[in-house]
Image (cartoon, rainbow, N blue to C red):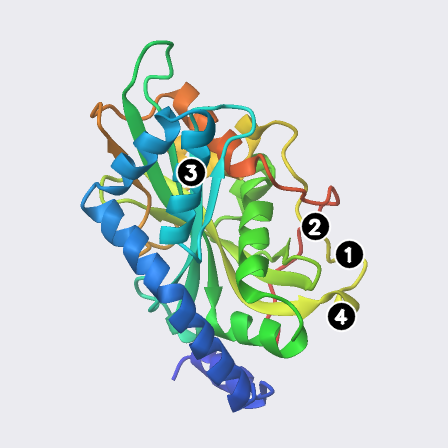
């Protein structure tokens, strides 16, 4: 047994137990999230989701509102958001229960998890009179089951689904230049989870099957506000969407991959063209437009939390 194994075993032995009622609550919540996630991901795989969103993007007025309502009814556990600033950009965010996603993971990395995923549909190329539509999908945040259970235990009034979406927004809007150096080095960041507290996360680099690099955050536990020290503050938001992690997450960053993920970003287009820089800017604006991340920075050395 290596020293790392001994440390992991010792930590596991001393970790306060999460009550079984909390695990049952988490399992029940996953059952409510799974149908929507499965439907969206099936439609991503067979390229029908891009058709759904294409019709919505081209509709106007009352017809657009009716289609938006109908799609939201089809995906009840997802968040469907037309861009406030760009009429032809639509984003879809959902929480998907998954088995462990890190290849070669050790210890706590072998937990089941919740993935906060996002898909953004946008004109490509983004020129007047061009009707081709592209769809880009990725995941932004992995919440280990232990972290999800700690939120349910320590903030029983909070909505885990909304807290997950809020934390993913906070990561997507963070300053990319602050996040890129943290990839794979074990440093701890804090992502606000609604008004309940913060998820304690590390930044992980991955790559697609095509070799394109991307980053996401992995939450290992949850701390309520009353437990946070003054120096445990969220990452600062980017001054401009083009400088945010959302753009780094779609392959524009240069962070090196430290861990390979089992799945990653996917791109679909009825024009069969890869996203241009302008298109990636549209993606980052769509993913960051509704966020209200606090402005105080925090980068701390990695440590185990319970």
Looking at the image, which residue sits at the far right?
A: 230
- What SS does tag 1 mark? loop
Disc 2 from disc 4: Cα separation: 16 Å
For disc 1, the marked residue is 231
Name the residue nearer the viewer: 153 or 13. 153
Residue 57 placed where, x, y %?
Answer: 38, 28
Q: Earlier in the sequence, mark 3 or mark 4?
A: 3
Q: CA distance from mark 1 to mark 2?
A: 7 Å
Give the residue at mark 2. 298
Would you say the residues marked 1 and 2 are in contact, meaning their CB atoms lie under 8 Å apart? yes
* Mark toward the viewer: 2 or 4: 4
- Left or right of 253, for residue 175: right
Q: CA distance from mark 1 to mark 4?
A: 12 Å
Alpha carbon distance from label 3 to label 1: 47 Å
Earlier along the polypeptide chain: callout 2 or callout 4?
Answer: 4
Numbered badge on residue 227: 4
Measure the alpha-carbon separation of dots 3 and 4. 45 Å
Q: Which residue is mark 3?
A: 66
Name the secondary structure under disc 4.
helix
Mark 1 neighbour class, 10 Å CA radius: few under 14, some 14 to 19, many 20 or more = few
Q: Hey, which quadrant is residue 232 in on the image?
A: bottom right
Closer to the observer: label 3 or label 2? 3
Residue shown at 26% from the left, 46% from the top: 44
């Amino acid at each position: 047994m290596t020293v790392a194994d001994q440390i992991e075993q010792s930590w596991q032995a001393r970790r306060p137990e999460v009550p079984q009622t909390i695990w049952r609550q988490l399992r029940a919540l996953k059952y409510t999230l799974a149908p929507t996630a499965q439907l969206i991901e099936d439609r991503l795989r067979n390229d029908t989701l891009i058709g759904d969103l294409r019709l919505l993007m081209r509709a106007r007025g009352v017809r657009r509102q009716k289609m938006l309502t109908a799609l939201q009814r089809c995906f009840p556990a997802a968040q469907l958001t037309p861009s406030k600033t760009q009429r032809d950009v639509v984003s879809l965010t959902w929480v998907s229960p998954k088995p462990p996603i890190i290849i070669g993971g050790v210890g706590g990395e072998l937990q089941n998890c919740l993935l906060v995923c996002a898909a953004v549909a946008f004109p490509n190329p983004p020129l007047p009179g061009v009707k081709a539509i592209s769809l880009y999908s990725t995941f932004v945040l992995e919440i280990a089951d232990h972290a999800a259970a700690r939120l349910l235990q320590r903030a029983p009034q909070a909505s885990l689904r909304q807290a997950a979406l809020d934390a993913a927004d906070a990561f997507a809007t963070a300053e990319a230049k602050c996040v890129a150096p943290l990839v794979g080095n074990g440093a701890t960041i804090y992502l606000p989870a609604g008004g309940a507290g913060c998820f304690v996360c590390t930044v992980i680099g991955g790559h697609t099957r095509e070799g394109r690099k991307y980053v996401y955050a992995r939450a290992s536990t949850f701390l309520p506000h009353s437990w946070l020290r003054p120096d445990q503050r969220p990452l600062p938001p980017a001054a401009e969407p083009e400088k945010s992690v959302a753009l780094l997450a779609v392959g524009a960053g240069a962070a090196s991959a430290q861990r390979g993920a089992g799945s990653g970003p996917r791109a679909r287009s009825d024009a069969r063209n890869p996203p241009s820089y302008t298109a990636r800017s549209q993606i980052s604006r769509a993913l960051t437009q509704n966020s209200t991340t606090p402005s105080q920075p925090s980068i701390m050395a990695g440590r185990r939390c319970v």
